[in-house]
Amino acid sequence: MHDRIRHAGLLEKRMSAEAAAALIKPGMTVAMSGFTGAGYPKAVPQALAAQMETAHAAGTDFKIKVLTGASTAPELDGVLAKVGGMELRLPYMSDPALRKRINDGDLDYMDIHLSHVAQHTWFGFYGGINIAIVEVVGIREDGSLIPSTSVGNNKTWLDMADAVILEVNAQQSAQLEGMHDIYYGTALPPHRKPIALVAPEDRIGQAYLDVDMNKVIAVVETDAPDRLSAFAAPDEASTQIASHLLDFLDGEIKTGRLTDKLLPLQSGVGNIANAVLAGLSRGGYRGLKAYTEVIQDGMLELIKDGTLAFASATSFSLSEAGIEEFNRNVDFYRERIVFRTQEISNHPELIRRLGCIALNGMIEADIYGNVNSTHVVGSHVMNGIGGSGDFARNGYLGAFMSPSTAKGGKISGIVPMASHVDHTEHDTMLIITEQGLADLRGLAPKQRARVITEKCAHPDYKPMLEDYFARASRDSYGKHTPHLMGEALSWHQRYIETGDMRL
């Protein structure tokens, strides 16, 4: 590992994961690296979970507050959740064990726009950070750090934490060096200045993370892979959703609102997103650019075949095959990919200025275009808002996509009133299901209701929606956004009681 830890002073701070974990005390706020299962610390959280379990068995309450970039993996979120080691978690999660703890009411979870986390930390909204645990590829001679497969909030964690633990992971490719663009020009209001980024490929910072070496209390050597997220091949519904979107984009080109180079793409994670990316390649698009959060397998394929000329993100989210592909052709990809801090990758002003096309998933939408992307029947959290709000509100186009039904048809993706609202009707331009695409631009609420029901609802639910809207339009207290308040959430209550939204 000496070729990975090239600073003599930090080399002397090496210790085991267990010794490093012992430096973390109950009640601390600990900020950790990691974004969508990439670049998270692997060893110290597991050692910490073991120590928590021992403490709990001895009757000592041992919990910490945990901040990250986004979701991590079982070796971090999973192990800490299983031993009951967290009292607070933010800003995003997807681990099943952690989700269960949150929904059982055992720990508090703050769901936050990803662009807000770093600045809110600087503003002091979350209190201080006692320790940062950050995975890196290596430590250079001058003490600067080679970032790993995600950047996320690592710059802020290193700057704000009282103490720092570094995990140097030999499994991460040394060829990642130079692929990062860490911007150190941010400042607190009223001293902020414009960010000089005008295209996804622009570099405005430096390739390395800075750290105060006096704050580094431990260096832990690891050799472990990121969580490998294999995505299933797009199913029929995902393929149909992609087809509707691509037909829409073709129409926008024909009207002159877009060119055949489109605008920078932002794509959420999952099978629908991968189906859309695959459709772009089949559709003959070439030389596109992405300004997004994560690089998935599908984006590597688009870069390789020329569909994408360049991609800016804050993290990888690759399968094992995707990692192998990247490592085989790293010299090719390093010229076409850059990783930034998430406060830049998700920056609202940059998203608006670049004119991003935002493509994100949802759990449900109501007939007026309010979107729920996080909660089942209003209270059971599934993940988090992530960066979808950053991009939907500020992008050139904001699209939300989902199959029209779930649970074998027992849940409708289009409902009278969303049981939880992450994205209001004011931020939603396109709703897409396998049934069709609703273009909501320029439409008033009642017009949106008719278009969403006609284009996006499943046939099993369309008559129910039409009946609800007709009665609401006749009997509601006000007629601008007609609702029957005693009935608006009855579909969700019926599902809770019977397991089926259908009458």
Image (cartoon, rainbow, N blue to C red):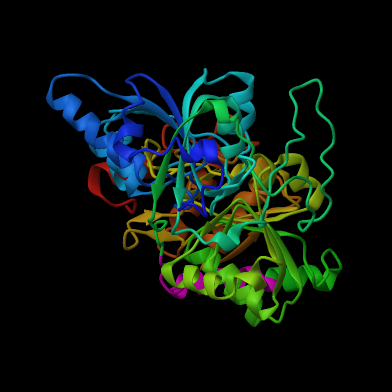
Residue 80 seen in render: no
Task: Count the marks.
Answer: 0
Q: Which of 226 and 413 is in front in this view?
A: 226
Q: Nearer the viewer, residue 157 or 192?
A: 157
Residue 345 is situated, as x and y percent measured from the top left of the image, at: 67, 47
Queried whether the magenta region covers residue 240, the answer comes back as yes
Image quadrant assignment for residue 244: bottom right
Q: Residue at x 37, y 47 (%)?
A: 42
Instruction: Give the left or right position of residue 101, taking residue 389 as reference.
Output: left
Queried whether the magenta region covers residue 186, the answer comes back as no
Residue 188 is situated, as x and y percent measured from the top left of the image, at: 74, 23
| Main secondary structure found in the magenta portion | helix
283, above or below 19, in the image: below
Q: Which residue is drawn at 82% across and 48% down?
A: 197
Residue 22 seen in render: yes
Q: Residue at x 54, y 50 (%)?
A: 138
378, above or below 457, in the image: above
Image quadrant assignment for residue 399: bottom right
Residue 312 is situated, as x and y percent measured from the top left of the image, at: 68, 57
Q: Which of 348 and 434 is in front in this view?
A: 348
- Furthest-left residue in this view: 58
Instruction: Give the left or right position of residue 106, taking residue 194 as reference.
Output: left
Q: Nearer the viewer, residue 491 or 9?
A: 9
Residue 436 is situated, as x and y percent measured from the top left of the image, at: 57, 67
380, above or below 110, in the image: below
Residue range corresponding to the magenta coloring: 230-247
